[in-house]
Amino acid sequence: MVEFALVLPLLALLLLLAVDFGRVFFGWVGLQNAARIGASYAAMYPEAWATPGDAAKKAQYVANIQADAAGINCALQNPLPAPSYPNGTALGEDAVVAFTCNFDLITPFLSQIMGNPIQLNGRAVFAIRSGQFAGPAGGPPPPPPPPPACHTVPNMVNRTVLQARGDWTTTAGFTGPFTPATGKDTEVVSSQTTIPASNPGDCIAIGSSVSVVSAAPGACPAGQAKVPSLVGLLVSAARTKWSANGFTGSFSPSGQNTDTVLGQTTTPASAPNDCRATTTSVTVTHGPPPPPPPPPPCTVPNFIATPSGNAQGTWTAAGFTTTVSFKQVNKLPYQIGQQDLVSSSSVPCSSAIQVGP
């Protein structure tokens, strides 16, 4: 019993210390939560602290913090400090709430060491999520952009007149006249002229006008001829064909006849079947004709279990040009049981085959 009497005061002191430490920690946690509630409210209503401010919202801010801190036995500052906005009150900036409270200890020994009451600090930061104070985003929507000062000229060559008319007015957005305004819808455009003068891809005023020259599909307008394909012809034949198609422009080379045309280049540039001015010139590259492609292979038929008398007809029908060779001719006719080329294989049509019983 003496030992218990000696230890009891120490145990009681430790118990009181544990209780006070628990109360302090609980108070600190509650204080942080109260600061978070205040910062959250300040981030939602930053306009309450703008000039002249909103007294009702300020009072609600204080009431929210005091209600949450009421159970932590901690005396808050009076009056509570207002929230701060270090970087302004635009959306996404910080709303900061920081305050202190005085917490009363119940253990005299701890009070002598740490002082009584002790000061606890609460601080929280929330991003502003309501209001517009740093820019004009909360005002009326910005005016629509002004219409473009110019529109892009479309390339209407090789389009039908109907398509070109749509390209000019609907797609490109020009308000100037398109000539011809009606008719010739199925004819193909061979050239276009704008006023003011421009090329496809240029940007010109919206009121500019355009006129097109067109011809029936497959025909070239007056003063033009259709570019022939000369590749594969002898140079002499290509020269004749160039003139026969109505071209008066030069043909190069002028003195070569026996080579084969391998390529052609016109001035101005064109492709076969394009319509170009009859004065267009052409230059061809030439050389020996390319070797003919190898003949296609033939597929070996299956002779197994077929009569020998049908073998040659089957072989010829498959495209082969040779004669079937028979083993053991003295036993003909017989049912074929073997062949030296594998059926369904692809071999030259000049290949030979031997079959046997």
Image: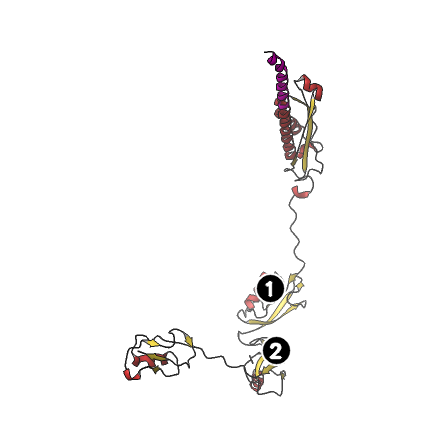
Dominant secondary structure, magenta: helix
> Please, what is the three-letter code of the amino acid marked with disc 1?
Trp
Mark number, residue 265:
2
Question: Residue 73: which quarter of the image?
Answer: top right
Q: Quadrant of the N terminus?
A: top right
Question: Residue 17: which quarter of the image?
Answer: top right
Q: Disc 2 on helix, strand or loop?
A: strand
| Residue 321 part of the magenta segment | no
Instruction: Say which of marks 1 and 2 sits in front.
Output: 2
Question: Residue 18: which quarter of the image?
Answer: top right
Q: Which residues are magenta?
A: 1-22
Q: Are marks 1 and 2 in contact (CB under 8 Å)?
A: no
Q: Quadrant of the C terminus?
A: bottom left
* Up-down relation of residue 223 to residue 212 (above or below): below
| Residue 14 part of the magenta segment | yes
Instruction: Report if residue 139 is visible in the image.
Output: no
Q: Residue at x 61, y 22 (%)?
A: 71
Q: Disc 1 on helix, strand or loop?
A: helix
Q: CA distance from mark 1 to mark 2?
A: 32 Å
Give whichever of 142, 43 is nearer the camera: 43
- Residue beneath label 1, please? 168
Position in image of residue 161 (x %, y %): 56, 68
Instruction: Report if residue 137 is visible in the image.
Output: yes
> Please, what is the three-letter code of the amino acid marked with disc 2?
Thr
Mark number, residue 27:
none
